[in-house]
Amino acid sequence: KQRLEGKRVLVTAAGQGIGRASALAMAAEGAQVFATDVNAEALATLTGVETFALDALSDDSVTEGVARANPDVLFNCAGFVHHGSILDATDDELDFALDLNVRSMLRTIRAALPAMLERGTGSIINMSSACSNVIGAPNRFIYGTTKAAVIGLTKSVAVDYMSQGIRCNCICPGTVDSPSWQDRVDQLGKELGSKEAALKQFVERQPMGRVATAEEIAALVVYLASDESAFTTGHPHIIDGGWSGQ
Ligand code: NAD
């Protein structure tokens, strides 16, 4: 038997990076996967999963998408990384990050929970980060603030529904190779004068001496989606190459 047989899964931000790798990994384990993203072009390159456009910033889009997928497993992956300290941050940037990194999860969970409660089962997986209340990272003020909020949101949902068959966990990756991470490396490379120097900075903070692949994070998502993880809820699951583990 495959690990996710019979499960309907909704993934946000599945067009690239961790969301994409997770959608494919869950499909490979037998789940019926609904891979969604605001970027329809990126979705068009996916095979073996159902795809449709879903904008995690829009109430209507989320309501429609969740009704269509009717998920047993919800993977809230959408998020954005702002660069800078508290003195660099603008209110608009903070509002945007709170909307995409945090409020998007309120939207999807509110929409998906009633049917999960009716069935008496469900697994919600939220994307946090090691950069949160787990560990502070330089120039990640807005990002770390919002990703810490995801942990509070996760625990709150978990505690309210744990006796009704619903689990809610979040994952806290360290640095992961993804298209947007490559952009961040290029950007820092311009500031430091070389891409090599930028890569060195990202890699050195992780004691294992490398960044993760999206597939390594997807393996944790599969576990949390499956019934193998039936005894864990309300937790940040840290997967960070030893960054915060020393
Ligand atoms: P990425 O940043 O390269 O891709 C993000 C995807 O999100 C894109 O496909 C984009 O179209 C989609 N998206 C943007 N706005 C959206 C919206 N409004 N609705 C739906 N989708 C939208 O992918 P990544 O780097 O794997 O990041 C995915 C998640 O993992 C994010 O929440 C990020 O904060 C988190 N994360 C990433 C890392 C890392 O180092 N890459 C580490 C920890 C956590």
Image (spheres, rainbow, N blue to C red):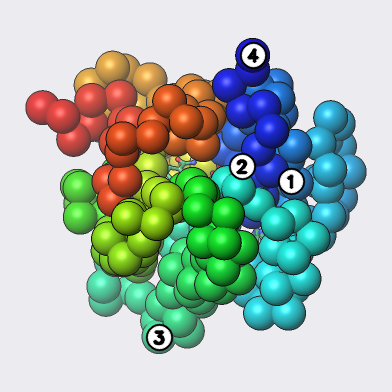
- Whichever of callouts 3 and 1 sits on the residue coming sooner in the sequence is 1
Element under label 3? Answer: helix
Q: Which residue is mark 1?
A: 35
In three-dimensional space, the C-alpha distance between marks 2 and 1, rounded to whole angstroms, equals 8 Å
**Which residue is found at the position 45% from the left and 81% from the top?**
95
Beta carbon at label 2 within 8 Å of ligand 1: yes
- Whichever of callouts 3 and 2 sits on the residue coming sooner in the sequence is 2
Between 194 and 14, which is closer to the camera in this rendering? Answer: 14
Q: Nearer the viewer, mark 3 or mark 1?
A: 1
Q: Which residue is mark 3?
A: 91
Give neighbour class at mark 1: few <14, some 14-19, many 20+ (Cα, 10 Å): many
In three-dimensional space, the C-alpha distance between marks 4 and 2, rounded to whole angstroms, equals 24 Å
Q: Are marks 4 and 3 in contact (CB under 8 Å)?
A: no
- Residue type indicated by callout 3: Asp
For the question of whether residue 16 can be seen, the reply is: no
- Residue type indicated by callout 2: Gly
In three-dimensional space, the C-alpha distance between marks 3 and 2, rounded to whole angstroms, equals 28 Å
In three-dimensional space, the C-alpha distance between marks 4 and 3, rounded to whole angstroms, equals 50 Å
Residue sitting at the far top: 1
- Residue type indicated by callout 1: Ala
**Which residue is found at the position 81% from the left and 36% from the top?**
49
For the question of whether residue 96 can be seen, the reply is: yes
- Whichever of callouts 4 and 1 sits on the residue coming sooner in the sequence is 4
Q: Which residue is mark 2?
A: 19
Q: Are marks 4 and 1 in contact (CB under 8 Å)?
A: no
- Residue type indicated by callout 4: Lys
Q: Are marks 2 and 1 in contact (CB under 8 Å)?
A: yes
